[in-house]
Amino acid sequence: MRTARFFCDSIHRDTGTILTDVQFRHLTKVLRLKIGDSVELFDGKGTLAQAIIEKIEKSQAVLLVKTIENHPKPTQQRIIIASSIAKGDRFELLVAKCTELGIDRIVPVIFERTVKQSLQHRRLETIALESTKQCQRLFLPIIDSPISLSQAIEKLRADYPNAKIIFGSLTQNAESIINFDSALNEIIAFIGPEGGLTETEENMLKQTNAQPVKLTETVLRIETAAITFAAVLAAMRKK
């Protein structure tokens, strides 16, 4: 049976580590763990600890950390999904599944044909956190606030100057994602709205040497395209 894992942004070896709020309720109300049970702790920044439940109080649990491992954050082959906002809870699904697939950063992009709506950034971060726990990755993905396409291009090119940039396209000259050679590069994948990119937006991307790539012969919904990009690019990562 897999050891239960909990998020804690401050893990202490000597003074005891405290779990409160959502993590405490999950430990006591959902999993019904008891004093003496073994658990894992992670901080979303590469720290993984093995701990024992020492005390369970009214609103918190005190954990005794036995061992700690510190893993370095990956700086190569990072994958960034820059996707149009999707309607309803579909963007939340996108965040959850891209997190499970190991995507390093998710950038909500407002294209000209994006259906305007607000995103609850804190909720997206919570969804990413729960997905990180579920899939047992050690690093939380970065979740950006929504920005325009021009802002996203400028920001991401500055943050990842050596990254390859691709975008979803159904045009005849678009290469199949299967034939795309990611090598050891970082990848920024732009996913447009269901109404498609405007000519201006496509030209804006091409001016950055972005490569049009095709996922299927069919028109995909935003979250389907983003998750497919994430799955294929994650599978292409070279170890």
Image (cartoon, helix red, strand yellow):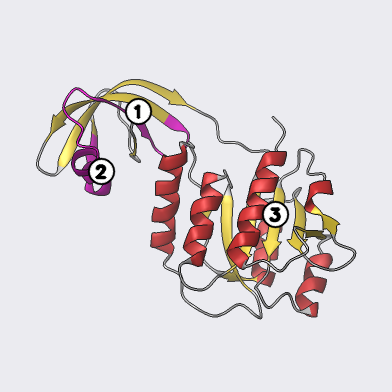
Q: Is residue 188 positioned above or below 133 on the image? A: below
Report which residue position mark 2 lands on: 26
Residue at 60%, 36% (x, y): give it. 74
Q: Give the Cα distance between marks 3 and 1.
A: 34 Å
3 or 2: tag closer to the N-terminus: 2
Residue 77 can be seen in this image: no
Residue 87 pos. (x, y %): 51, 73
Report which residue position mark 3 lands on: 188
Mark 3 or 2: in front is: 2
Determine the secondary structure under disc 2: helix
Contact check, label 3 and label 1, Cβ < 8 Å: no
The amino acid type found where label 2 is placed reads His
Query: How many numbered markers are drawn?
Result: 3
Determine the secondary structure under disc 3: strand
Neighbourhood count class around disc 2 (C-alpha, 10 Å): few under 14, some 14–19, many 20 upward: some
1 or 2: tag closer to the N-terminus: 1
Image quadrant assignment for residue 198: bottom right
Report which residue position mark 1 lands on: 3
Magenta highlight range: 18-47
Q: Residue furthest left?
A: 58
Residue at 48%, 53% (x, y): give it. 96
Q: Is residue 34 positioned above or below 204 on the image? A: above
3 or 1: tag closer to the N-terminus: 1
Neighbourhood count class around disc 1 (C-alpha, 10 Å): few under 14, some 14–19, many 20 upward: few
Residue at 40%, 38% (x, y): give it. 43
Q: Give the Cα distance between marks 1 and 2.
A: 14 Å
Residue 15 pos. (x, y %): 23, 26
